[in-house]
Image (cartoon, rainbow, N blue to C red):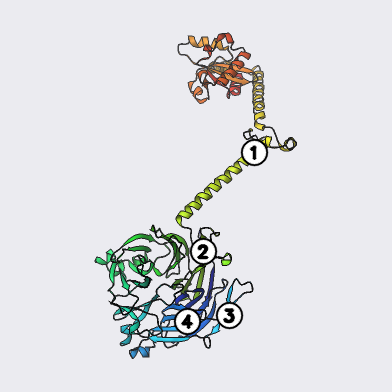
Amino acid sequence: MAPELPLSRVKLTYPLNAADFDPSNQDFLLVGGGGGSSSTGVPNKISLIDTSPREQLREIVDVELAKNEDSVTTLAVATSSNSALTAFAGINSSAADQAAGKNEHLRSFRIGLPARKRKADGTTVEVQEKTPAAGSGTYALGRKAVFTSAKGSKNDTYQRVLRFSPYRKGSPDQRLAAIASGLAPENEIVVFRPVSSPGPKDEISRIRLGKREAADLDLTSSKASPEDYLLAYCTDDELFIQQLPSKLPSKVAAPRLLYQTMESTTSLPSNKRPKFRALRFLTPHHLLLVQNAPNRTGVFLLILKINKDYSQAQITIRKRLSKSIKAAVGLDVCTLTESEQGEKQFVIAVASQSSFIELLTIDYSSDYGLAAFRPYTVLEEVHNGPLTRLVLSNYNGPSSPVAKDAGPQSIRLASVGVDQFVTVHYLPLRPLPATKNKTPRYVLMLPSRFDSIQTIFSAVVALMSVAIVALLLQAFCEIRGASPPILGATDWLSPRVQSYIARPYYFAESIPHAQTQVSLAAESVTQKLKDVQTQIPGVDDVKTTVEDVISDVNQKLADLVETNSELETPKAIVVRDAGVGEISTELHHDAELIKEEALKKWEELSDSQKKGWKRKLKDAGHWAEGQGESILKGILFSELAGAVGEFVRGA
């Protein structure tokens, strides 16, 4: 059953295109968008949202941008402190500036954070009501034309992608930024240090793509040196990687082609090929890719494993997403805390333009690598229109050892769309191992091995519960006389309690009584038939015929044995217990009737059964000890059909 996640929303006054969480505090979410330079009157804005109240999101900072410029296309938080955060955005200049060959598309802002206060119990952080931009420490820091085509004549170039390297707790300033252009005469990727107005000395790498566009890109620290970085980017059908040095000036090697789809080497038209849409680093040697199948027929998640020298890669895991995700438009990953043994879990969110979001997890171990994808839930129709941006908050986790007052842990999933809504889902985390451990790591879903252990434990508990209930039920039935005394439960009670609630075994007493009643009833019916015999002509003939078909009933057993031995074709001799101390002996001619009855030969009876039959035959005058057991061999014995046999015989 899919979990129901807490949800909070707020509607702003403009359509939204971009969003990013404060990397050091998931209470703050930065969003941006607008109506562009059109005359519709829809403003261009950047808003800071307080996500801490789960009842209703609040807009606490409102930055209104120029109306004659383009809307916000990309947005990301570079650094943050207790008083402010620094953000970069992609915003094209006005049409007049672009015509003059000046498109300052890279913008930076300082967003002042409102004062914070704690509740009286000290558990929840609150922020003041919405703070106007003026006088709050919020202002533009810089604007720069970084792309080559942005400095030429007017064209459709825009800043399609903006990404930062992972935020490092304790060293938040050591980050790199990368941007990619779209719709340019010659598209580019530029990697730089995120200063307010980056110049040539801040540029680390510039990759010229020609007419191709980068669908997505990502940065991560190199495994060999945390001060070095890796850049990965994808076009529709190719994946590249570039190693970046941390120290400048340094020579940067050209990007390497890591992977190319098979379809791209064929003559298939572009609309018949699958296309890469997004990517993220999971580790320096594992890349997560989202690939859209042609014609909106599905979405695949791929894990690409890269070799040690970053020269080759191969797909090791492939998963098709839910049928509701027909074409992906967004991807984000949150890395949860790592254990001392190098184990950690990644939370993955994939969004479709139709506002469906699928959440999954994948576990990593330094010894075994990545496990399989595990679906968590699918969020349906999160927005009333196209979803434009999806982002997961960064998870820093409580410091170790975890204090008792750390409280429940969670991460947040934010999405924005053209419907002007900001939506935040709250994903609860659980400690692993148990909460009593002072240094747990946190996960969204239990890893498969822990899940199996929990399933086995649950099964054992369920079986024990069933066994206990069965024992109690058996004991109750014994005490109330509804079951034979297997456990001896009545002996558990004191004599006084036994006298009140205990009952003797009911069925053990009632079965002999029932047999006696059936026999008496059969005798009564037999007598009534005999009375009718004298009143209805021809009944004697019917009786004689029935007796001839059945056999000579009630003959002595010795006579039957002698008679049977003289027959040309011997028949079956059947002995039945007719109840009330009577024995019936029959010479059966109907073999099929014998097969239907539960009959046993003398040789098949147990010692106790033989002893019982000897006593019954002796009491009924059919056998004497002097005759020996040899006369009984081969004879068929039946106790169950005795009463019925007596009834038929009387009829």
Asked if residue 651 can be seen in this view, the reply is no
Neighbour tally class for label 1: few under 14, some 14-19, many 20 plus, Cα within 10 Å: many
Neighbour tally class for label 4: few under 14, some 14-19, many 20 plus, Cα within 10 Å: many
The vertical placement of 164 against 648, above or below, is below
As shown in the figure, which amino acid type bears the numbered disc 4?
Ile
As helix, strand or loop, the secondary structure at mark 1 comes to helix
Q: Which mark is first along the chain, 1 or 3? A: 3
Q: Which residue is mark 4?
A: 46
User: Which of these two is toward me, 404 or 452?
Assistant: 404
- The x and y percentages for residue 101 are 33, 89
Q: Which residue is mark 3?
A: 128
Asked if residue 259 can be seen in this view, the reply is yes
Q: Which residue is mark 1?
A: 475
Quarter occupied by residue 228: bottom left
As helix, strand or loop, the secondary structure at mark 2 comes to loop
The vertical placement of 78 against 600, above or below, is below
Neighbour tally class for label 2: few under 14, some 14-19, many 20 plus, Cα within 10 Å: some
The vertical placement of 109 against 615, above or below, is below
As shown in the figure, which amino acid type bears the numbered disc 1?
Ala
Q: Which mark is residue 429?
A: 2
User: Which of these two is toward me, 566 or 202?
Assistant: 202
* Mark 2 touches mark 4? (CB < 8 Å): no
Q: Which mark is first along the chain, 4 or 2? A: 4
Q: How much space separates mark 2 and mark 4, taking CA atoms? A: 30 Å
